[in-house]
Amino acid sequence: MAFIADFHIHSKYSRATSKDMDIPYLDEMAELKGIDLVGTGDFTHPVWLDSLKRTLSPEEDGLYRFRNTLFILTTEVNNIFYSHGITRKIHNLIFAPGFEAVEKINKKLARFGDLYSDGRPTLKMEAKDLVETVLASHEDAFVVPAHIWTPWFSLFGANYGFDSIEECFGEYTKYIYALETGLSSDPQMNWRVSSLDRFTLVSNSDAHSPSRLGREANVFSHRTGYKDVKKILREKNKEKFLYTIEFFPQEGKYHYDGHRRCGLCFSPRESRKHKNLCPKCGQPLTIGVMHRVENLADRDKDFNGAGDNIPFKHLIPLSEIIAEALGQGVDTKAVEDRYRGITQRLGGEFKVLLEVSETELSQSTSSRIVEGIMRVRKGRVKIRCGYDGVYGQVRVFDEEEKKGEKQLDLF
């Protein structure tokens, strides 16, 4: 049985985050989705950290448990600093092997920013100094650059990022083992940049609400403790790290270039044609992930690096498939009821999306939902790209196809 992990989430103490982002809700949602291991997120926030200490029970392999879900101590921080003549804004994930290490990390980081102000604190320190600080706190703690292509706050971001990992982390680059692809890119896009070949690519949800948990995730061959996670990422172990679960990157809200205020979405070629300026208002376009990848790529778009890298699978969340099949909104009660019924009967969302046979699906839900799931497995989807903070749309059914079901099935 595969072991599914989502390392990057946020608590209710982060800005723009649901009040339901606490451990009991996360446990409930992890069980519905079939996720085994969840990052705690936000361990730098003193109130959240106190809650984690009171709620979680330690396991022998560096993980923690609440009811049916395992947790690993993680947080995201925002590093803002001046380097190579410009201001840099980089988000990084920190992994810690225990609460004692967390206390040491937090004590050091508190000198660089207010840890109470946000679950994802802003730290006025260089990214390489963050790695040094984390390593000095505990030899098993480590840093993973977050959503590395996002325009505003990331390692390679078009607005405040760098052109290479070495430029950002300097002599501490050797302690960076993994990179988080983010929702707007997938491994195939990252493989185009040969300088990233030595790094293991991970995918996480960056969830701000329980329903978003696992929209991207990592699939391991078996239960994986803290030290195992670090070792697998460091060695890029394909026998133990089976694949990542990915958004269709076009659905990410920064995949293409554009200007939200003017309603313009451009491919990189179209942006270059307009000199990266909005033709309606003349303001600079927000340069998206695909454009940035093309700027740094030294391989063409058809390059296949699957032989040397961790594989991946594109999925659409089950709730979105159900919503489209029923012709209703994702957050409606009808969709939630159907989602809970299917996942509880068949062993979780990921099992439904990845493993359950078409015959067994047909015995548990409507033919239209089954058809939607099978189309996603085959990659038969239609996509409108996201841009400048606007999520893209991935459609399973044609507009001319019958929308929704006239009559709900009896299951």
Image: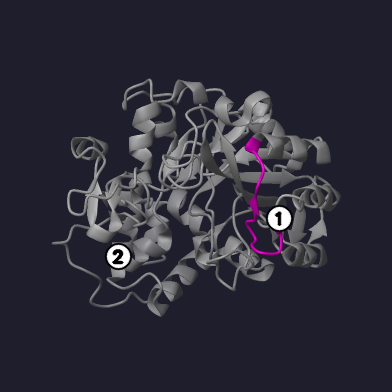
Mark 2 lies on a secondary structure that is helix
- What residue is rendered at 31% in x and 54% in y? 392
- The residue pinned by badge 2 equals 324
Would you place residue 325 above or below residue 406 in this image? above
Compare marks 1 and 2 and give the one earlier in the sequence.
1
In this picture, which residue range is highlighted in magenta?
114-127
Q: Quadrant of the N terminus?
A: top right
- State the quadrant of the C terminus: bottom left
Q: Main secondary structure of the magenta part?
A: loop
Residue 8 in the image: above or below residue 269? below
Label 1 amino acid?
Leu
The reply, left or right, for residue 215 in relation to residue 386 is right
Pinpoint residue 171: horizontal percent, then vertical percent. 67, 24
Question: Which residue corresponds to the image point at 26% horizontal and 78% vertical from the top-left?
Answer: 407
Compare residues 120 and 67 and report the one nearer the observer. Answer: 120
Question: Horizontal placement of 376 versus 131: left or right?
Answer: left
In this rendering, does residue 368 appear at all? yes
Decide which of 304, 19 is in the foreground and name it: 19
Q: Disc 2 marks which amino acid?
A: Glu
- Name the one closer to the observer, 123 or 72: 123
**Mark 1 to mark 2: distance in Å?**
32 Å
Q: Residue at x 49, y 58 (%)?
A: 349
Rendering coords of residue 194 (x, y %): 46, 21
Mark sitting on residue 393: none
Q: How is the image coloured?
A: one colour
Q: Which residue is mark 1?
A: 70
- Mark 1, other Cα within 10 Å: few <14 / some 14–19 / many ≥20: many
Q: Residue 137: name its quadrant.
A: top right
- The answer to which image quadrant residue 25 occupies is bottom right
Q: Is residue 46 left or right of residue 278?
A: right
